[in-house]
Amino acid sequence: MGRKAALVAWLRELDVQGIRDVLSSREDAARTRPHSLRALADELTATASLRIAVEGLDQGARDVLDAVARLGGRADVEAVAEQLRCNGKAARAELKRVLAQLRARALVWPAGRGVVGSPGLRPLLDEPARRITPAPRLPRRTAQHRGYADRAGIAPATSTVDGMTRLLAFCDLEPVACRSGLGLRELRRIAGVLRAEEARVRLWVELAVEVRLLAAEGGWLLPTTRSDAWRAAPTAERLAALVEAWPRLAGVPGRQRQAVVEPSPSDSGGRARRGVLARYAELGPDEAFEHRHEVVAELAWSRPAVWGAGVAEAVLVEAESLGLVALGALTSLGRVLLEGGAGAAAGAGGAAGASGVAAAGGAAGAGGVAAVAGRFVPPSVSTADLRPDLTAVVEGLPDRELSAVLELVAEEAGGSGGVWRFGGAGVRRALDLGHEPDALLARLGAVAAHGVPAALADLVREVARQHGRITVVPVACCVRTADPVLLAEIAARRSLASLGLRPLGPTVLASAKPVAETLALLRAAGYAPASAGADGAPVVARVPRQRATPPPVRRGGGVVDGWGNGRRGEPLGEQDLSRLAVALVDRERPRQWYVPPCAESRRMGAVRLLRDQSLVLRDSEVLLLAEALVTRTSVEVAVANGPRTAVKHVITPVDHASGNLTATCGPRGEAREFLVSDIRSVRVVARA
């Protein structure tokens, strides 16, 4: 008999409750609404269904399932116990628990004295397990005021909004190569410029793509038309859009990989993120986990396919960076996100609110998460403290105008934002873009909380005095200066030989390269040229901003959304599962419409309980013991007495409860109790 045929035979032995238990534990197979037990067996052994069932196992169950898969046709309880060294009472109890869990998921089922694994199963581990991995200790809890976590989450949440803003500004000014994903080289380049960790930049990129602030277009990662509205929105709404997008991310954290910039049908990353928040939500309002490594260990053991290999730790780092988890507890922001505060924003394309950020992320606007997010970020500031040491200190998140001025003239001094440093390169950059010195100082004064210090004003005027001593005019083109000595120096520079410079007069050189290339090479050689028109007037260079078209909105469509996410069929409720189980059993046993007599009902109930409590007895022995219990007849049982010996008794079963069998034993009729799990065999009493 093949394994699938054995599965069908086992399913036919189950009653309605047994079939319902299988359908409940394998919901993906039940969604297809199989018309027969054979069709149900086909669904249970499908590759996709097996993968889902195995992903839901804890590490102990995976160890046992791996042992069954390796033993193949030789699998029985004793062989599995021997391979996993289940010699003690506790180990045997754990093996029994795991086998019951696997049987409920129809991954393993009994066949005589052996067990059969589902067809299509392969060994799950690289090396066979030497024992069943024990469950780690439950994470210890400690008392902690609920407000502490909220206060601790303010700094990381603010840093994330600031980092996302700086990422959009970088992609607006610098070309970022991107095709199917943002590669590791580009990620590390951006991380170096933004002075942030690679994992944080990957999270920012994927959040920006999910909120549709960045999009891959023509091989480049570009800001979308929605990014300007997001950057101009209030800080609380910007954070709310990122928080609501976080559970929808498809990328699995904790792995060194390229950043995901395209929709993915996989939901493994989202399940890992939502599951961590749900675990922290089990805490009381004034409780916190004492040690995060205990939480990580428990999560990794309970679902290694979801939280193993460092995923749980990485998810926690992401949650903390968004202000969802802090000091071992769920913040009010994380709680409102988990409880559905986002409302219609559960899909990435919910109805746009009144603000630009709601349109950018499809979030719930000012309600739900956005209302709570206001307590986790400071309001945007429009001024900075310009200091005599040529630094600018921003107390909070800069608004759009302040960010534009600082990005134009200064360089950020720290990876977390807040401190900017002025220098000659930044001032020259502003002058190269056509800003006059007085206008530049006036713009700095408009964003200065205490005025422009003299040191900064002197720096701007000194750079402006030297700026423009060299001008480039298009002929093909020409380099012009009023200083003949400087012109001779330029003509003699070997690094500028590719320009083909030749003198046209005491103050003019002709270049063989276009204006843009001539300007770039002169600046690379250490000079500070300015661009001029044919009439000698300065040319203001403006870099055109590129904007990508946001991708279509992902909208949920029942179980399967517009991107193909989800599962087949409609979800089944409790009554639907019960009706389906009854229909499947009735199709196999169409004549059993009558109500069985009382004795038959007791017999079937006893058979079901005894089968669950003993994995050693064969089905025929279980039936014999149930018959003796109902009819009060005598049977001979062998009861374990140590690891390798058994003692035979002739008993008359009287009662059965909580895994204990009460019976009269021997000719004297002594009342004794036996553990059903200790009974090794049942036989008919030999007649004299």
Image: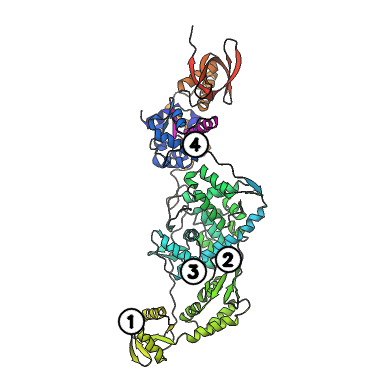
Mark seen at residue 234: 2
User: Which region of the structure is painted magenta?
Assistant: 88-112
The amino acid at mark 2 is Pro
The amino acid at mark 1 is Ala
Compare marks 4 and 3 and give the one earlier in the sequence.
4
Distance from label 4 to label 1 (Cα)? Answer: 74 Å
Reading the image, the residue beneath label 1 is 497
**Element under disc 2:** loop
Distance from label 2 to label 4 (Cα)? Answer: 53 Å
**Element under disc 1:** helix
Reading the image, the residue beneath label 3 is 169
Q: Where residue 204 sits in the image (x, y, percent)?
A: 49, 60
Reading the image, the residue beneath label 4 is 132
Distance from label 3 to label 1 (Cα)? Answer: 36 Å
Note whether residue 341 is visible: yes
Which image quadrant for residue 380? Answer: bottom right
Q: Between tags 2 and 1, which lies in front?
A: 1
Q: Between tags 2 and 4, which lies in front?
A: 4
- Position of 221 relative to 9 (above/below): below
Q: Between tags 3 and 1, which lies in front?
A: 1
